[in-house]
Image: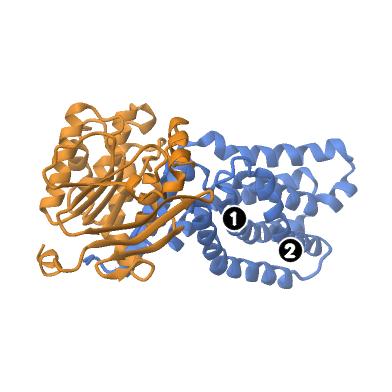
Chain colours: A orange, B blue
Amino acid sequence: MTESVTQAAIPLLELCNLGCERDERLLFSGLDVQLFPGDVVQIGGPNGAGKTTLLRALAGISTDFNGQIRYAGKSLPEATWEFAGDSLYLGHLPGIKKALTPAENLAWYKAQSGAAITINDALSAVGLYGYEDTPCYQLSAGQLRRVALARLHLSRARIWILDEPFTAIDKLGVSQLEALIAHQSAKGGVVILTSHQDLSLPQLRLVNLQDYQPTRNKTKNGISSLSGGDGYHA
Amino acid sequence: MRDNTPAASLLGGFIASFRRDLLIAARHKAELTNPLVFFLIAVTLIPLGVSPEKSVLALLAPGIVWVMALLATLLSLDGLFRSDYDDGSLEQMLISPQSLYFTVMAKVLVHWLVSGLPVTLLAPLLGLMLSLPIEGYLPLLASLALGTASMSLIGAVGAALTVSLRKGGLLLSLIVMPLYIPVLIFGASAVQTAVQGGAIGMQLAVLGAFLALAIVLAPIATLGALRISTNG
């Protein structure tokens, strides 16, 4: 907390002139965003605009981008190690092993983050109390998503990168997750998320990727958005 | 920023990954037995197909057991990173603050424990079926233990390179097979020489050198390949 106050002048995360392409098609370019402690940014744009591509680049999974990503003033390839310890990425794929129980799944993540909260507490916080020892293949899609979301409670990372975190979550779960994001922001963290839902968070900033699309590709993207691709092909 | 020491967290990460993969392997018993059953059936069919003659079988036994062990390892490779890739765990491994080297080592170690080690332990039984002379059993065990461990490590590189391909099985075999050939040559030769009454120190030393090299280099190549496979 004290750290975030002293570093207020330097953005925790900074995207400088960022551009991504996919299959030789420029998705967006010239993206400049500064994220200070407490910021919540929602990345918008139609299907295929490059939201997932952007988040994967931010998380450090994909290095296929132009421009720079800076973490606490340091350029990312140099600060990868610090950044990995201070960021949490939840993607489309939940990263949950179906053969294991929720508790066994989270044990692996807890070994990485070293958080103080117990796994059972994290599971009850996402409404999965009593499911600790149920194999994950017996859980519903929403419950599986909640197991992944329990990682937010187990993590001490300041930067959360969430790709469509509200998918398959019920109404109560959505409001709980919103509260959790607000709490993270109040603690001095940064949350970057994509969602097609309208969120009711006061500190929310919107970044629409459509504003950074090269104009000549507009019609092409309009067509591709109808085909339903989400810029994500595994 | 993290208050746990790097060394403790490295070991902790290795143990957490090791336990998780061992648990997953234990829950997929059917997949586990696949390479073993293949090994057993293939070796059992040889006397029926070639000749039940003891002298012929004894001559062929070292080579047959080694080739079948190699194929059994190859058969089990494709799934090494497949499920991690499909459910997103691989992405999480890549960006985790743990050293990926140790995560990969843990995965390969579990792979060897559930494929290479059982094959090694089963080999003397199959040697008996092929009337392998008595001098061959210990060399067979020793050479297979060293060889299958190298093969698991080398195979991980191929599995990592092909994990993003839907039908990567054939390509995986083509990538990995040439690298398995030296292991096969020295492994089979160790048993052959022992049966003929020669000293096998050289062959085992070379197999040990392969293993040492593979332990150092293969995980590095594997994690490079994993990054390429998930990039994009």
Q: Position of residue B229 (x, y in %)?
A: 53, 52
Residue at 30 percent of width and 47 percent of height? A107
* Residue B147 in view: yes
Q: Position of residue B57 (x, y in %)?
A: 85, 47
Kind of residue at badge 2: Pro
Q: Which of the numbered marks, if any, corresponds to residue B182?
A: 2
Left or right: B39 in relation to A26: right
Q: Pointer 1 indicates a residue of which chain? A: B
The one nearer the camera, B102 or A47, is A47
Find out whether the residues at labels 1 and 2 contact each other: C-beta distance under 8 Å. Answer: no
Q: Pointer 2 indicates a residue of which chain? A: B
Q: Secondary structure at mark 1?
A: helix
Q: Is residue B223 above or below residue A106?
A: below
Work out which quarter of the rendered image holds the N terminus of chain A and state it: bottom left
Badge 1 crowding class, 10 Å Cα cut-off, few under 14, some 14 to 19, many 20 or more, is: many
Q: Which of the numbered marks, if any, corresponds to residue A43?
A: none
Q: Secondary structure at mark 2?
A: helix
Q: Position of residue A145 (x, y in %)?
A: 31, 35
* Residue A125 in view: no
Kind of residue at badge 1: Ser
Q: Give the labeled residue for mark 1.
A: B152
Residue at 68 percent of width and 39 percent of height? B38
The number of numbered discs placed on residues in the rendered structure image is: 2
Q: Position of residue B194 (x, y in %)?
A: 78, 63
Residue at 30 percent of width and 63 percent of height? A83
Left or right: A175 in relation to B117: left
Left or right: B223 in relation to A108: right
What is the CA distance from the residue labelled 1 to the residue labelled 2?
A: 14 Å
Q: Are marks 1 and 2 in one subunit?
A: yes
Instruction: Report which quarter residue A34 is drawn in.
Output: bottom left
The one nearer the camera, B126 or A32, is A32
